[in-house]
Image (cartoon, rainbow, N blue to C red):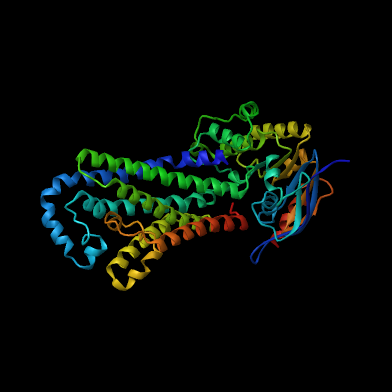
Amino acid sequence: MRTVLKRELIQNIKNLLIWSISVGILGLICILLYESMQGDMKEMADAFSNMGAFSDAFGMSTLSIASLKGYFATEIGAVHGLGSGMFAAITAISIISKEEDGHTGEFTFSLPLSRSKIIAAKGICVAIMLVVFTAVCTVFYIVGFKILGEDMPMDQFFTFMGSQLLMNAEIAGICFGLSSLAGKNRIGLGLGIALLLYSYDVMGRVVPDLKDSLFWGPYSYCNAAEIFTGADTPAKALVVAVIVLALGVLFAFWNYNRRDLAS
Amino acid sequence: MSKKVIEINNLTKSYGKSRGVIDVSFSVEEGDIFGFLGPNGAGKSTTIRSMLGFLKINSGSIKILGMDSIKDHEKILRDVGYMPSEAWFYDNMKVSDVIKYAADVRGLDCTEEAGKICEILKVDIKKRIKQLSLGNRKKVSIACAMQHKPKLFIFDEPTSGLDPLIQKKFFGLINEYVDNDATCLLSTHVLSEVDKYCRHAAIMREGRLMMLETPHIDDETFLSFYEDEEE
């Protein structure tokens, strides 16, 4: 199993580096832009905080984007949330199906390993990639804070990055389950799921009637504005996240062990 | 008495409403080179893929090396060398890495045997898989199937794409392993291969299997199995 895990990691390292460095650098550039925009921020912050539902949706009514904390939560929070969600989706949705899609299944599955062990190796690979992705981005953002020399509540920052990792894992869990369905490339579907879940969260924050249903989506518990204002973590959403993640992974094992493999 | 390496009883596998194989029973004894013939779509690959656990069978039983193909799937694969008809690997890997990977998963150091096979078959181990033709990919597949000296070889149309000299060397290798107590199931369309190398043979038609009295049949008899299928 370790050999399969090692090969999966080697195969995916290029994607991991491209995505983590891209999202990390994008976040870093945004952080560095804060200094040059600081002068104009006060007027912008006033304007942004009075945009009604949209200000609520993006946390600009509770956090001032004139502060680094508020700027990070509203700008980089969105960039990282979308970028990491998309990365988690495309990584997980192709990791199982690529064997049949690329016709390598007959080689891999003729090796003396059960399907469960191969799925486990692939699942662990996804988990490692998400952790490394989060760590790389975290380093980039911290470098940004250091360069600016501004105060940043690090406990809230780490809570934010941790909850983003959980959100990534939840999306990956859904896509991992879907990846076991059939040997077809479903990267488009993965990206669609990530964007749909993000849109669901934005809509839920804009439309008051949807607010009570927000906890179903993975973006509900990793909202930067809420975390940086010290709002309570929505326990219901965390429970849903853990259940969805577990169901996705269990479904992948169950489904892959019961079905025929395409040649 | 010879040991039965493959023992299939009343195997039935369907794909929804489509026929796969129906009530297939046969056995292959240790040290045999067993020819497995039949037109395209007759059920040869379905039988092989059921043996290897790629397909979930509807009914019947399969014993490989005395072990149950479902319960002991992982154990069985340790002693099986399989070469699929389409030899696909991970495109970006080097040939040497693919061969080493197959050995590493088995927890074996097959450097010496792999080196010998690659030399005989003239496998360029420095190239990447994506640079290889079908024939060269097949040679890599042969090396992966043989390097761990399995007790049972399962080859699905192994010689298509190989040049005549490599084909001859390939059968030379099979004979060498079989002389050392290995067994070989050879699925092929090439009658001359069955005639020259196989000791027993069976033919599949429309999902059903028929044992041949002898693997040395003439062209007309051989083709009649295919013609009947088309009518």
- Whether residue B174 can be seen here: yes
| Residue at position x 44%, y 62% in the image | A240
| Residue at position x 71%, y 55% in the image | B226
Q: Quadrant of residue B89?
A: top right
Height in image: A262 above or below A8? Answer: below
| Frontmost residue, B154 versus B220 | B154
Height in image: B94 above or below B50? Answer: above
Q: Which residue ends up furthest to the bottom in the rendered image? A: A209
What x and y, as percent, mark residue A92? 46, 51
| Residue at position x 13%, y 53% in the image | A41
What x and y, as percent, mark residue B33? 77, 40
Q: Is residue B104 left or right of residue B11?
A: left
What x and y, as percent, mark residue A33? 18, 45
| Frontmost residue, A165 versus B63 | A165
Q: Quadrant of residue B4?
A: top right
| Frontmost residue, A59 versus A98 | A59
In the picture, the quarter occupied by the N terminus of chain A is: top right
Q: Quadrant of residue A187?
A: bottom left
